[in-house]
Image (cartoon, rainbow, N blue to C red):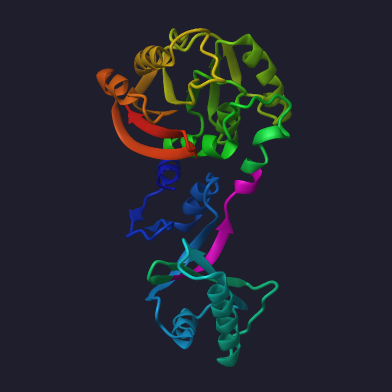
Amino acid sequence: MEGALEAENVPKNVLEPFIQVYRFEAPLEPAIRAFRRLALSHFLYEELCIMEKGVSDIEVIDSVSRKRLTGSVAFRVRRVRGSLTPEESFSLERRLNARAKDVGLLVDLENPRNLIEVIVSGSFLLIGRRICSSDRRKVFSRSGGTRPFFHPSSLKAELARAMLNLARVRRGSIVLDPFSGTGTILVEAYELQAIPVGLEIDPAMAYPSIRNYKWFGAVGVCQILGDARCMPLRSVDAIVTDPPYGRRASTHGLDSLKVYEEFIKNAAGVLRKSGRMVLLAPSEMPVEDFIESNGLMITETYFMEVHSSLTRKLLVAKS
């Protein structure tokens, strides 16, 4: 969320986070615009109050009543990482709606004007009014076999979108994927109204990927047949990529580590000042050394377990 807010130039004040909950203060409409960029988040809420987990049902209802919301309400309970059992969650939700009726609130479980969600996170209740949903369904619909050209190594659209947000990609910015493959990152960059440029050394990937761009209406994608170790561009605003590695990777007989090393050296040369590079790599690969030795600064690192024998790391570096 923070990357999306920065990409949209939204002024913000970051508040204390809770488990799986990002809290911030920001103007409403710009915050909604930034939130719509996300694919791995569910809902945006207006925070009403925070209470300790042991409070009574009537205290929760009273805290919401004091906000003087207009129109009907309905309560939903969301549990984070086993904070409640499914049975406890259902029971709390049923009791809150019943208690709301008892105190005179207009409860409409089917189509409420105000959907109040009680998020149980650790030992706290975060109570908020749902403002909107993310566009995750649209993004997820572009993953996997929904495209004309698919490859087992294809990146999922939701991960591509997250990487673009971490790169703080803005409208009109030039985004380069030097290992573009089936074009997932480029399609998502186009959806964010950036200028996507793809570089792919393998004709068997580069040419069929054009079918994907047409399928998704990404008519502004520029696809180049070329080598990431010798980039035919002078400068770009962001580099977002998933370089090849592993058994299914196509490195044309080259060592994967050497490919990363030479690619990063060239990437540092075309990335504009204050631009960001976001890339994936196997956790054991020492790409940090390549990044820092070429004058880039690593600002964020995340780890993702693919299966029992492979963990990937996602690195964000700034020029």
Q: Position of residue 72 (x, y in %)?
A: 62, 78
Q: Is residue 319 visible?
A: no
User: 215 or 200: which is nearer to us?
Assistant: 200
Which quadrant holds the C terminus?
top left
Vertical side of 122 occupied by 243: above or below: above
Q: Residue at x 66, y 28 (%)?
A: 218
Q: Position of residue 265 (x, y in %)?
A: 35, 14
Extent of the magenta region: 126-138
Measured along the vertical axis of the image, is residue 228 above or below residue 60? above
Q: Residue at x 60, y 76 (%)?
A: 74
Give whichever of 243, 50 is nearer the camera.
Answer: 243
Horizontal side of residue 266 vs 174, given as left or right: left
The picture places residue 102, in percent across and down from the top left corner, at: 58, 92
Image check: 3 left or right of 145? Answer: left
Q: Position of residue 28 (x, y in %)?
A: 47, 58
Question: Residue sitting at 49 percent across and 70 percent down?
Answer: 84
For the question of whether residue 228 can be seen, the reply is yes
Based on the displayed image, in which of its 4 quarters is residue 300 positioned?
top left
306 or 51: which is nearer to us? Answer: 306
Residue 132 is a magenta residue: yes
The chief SS type of the magenta part is strand
Rendered view: 201 above or below 68? above
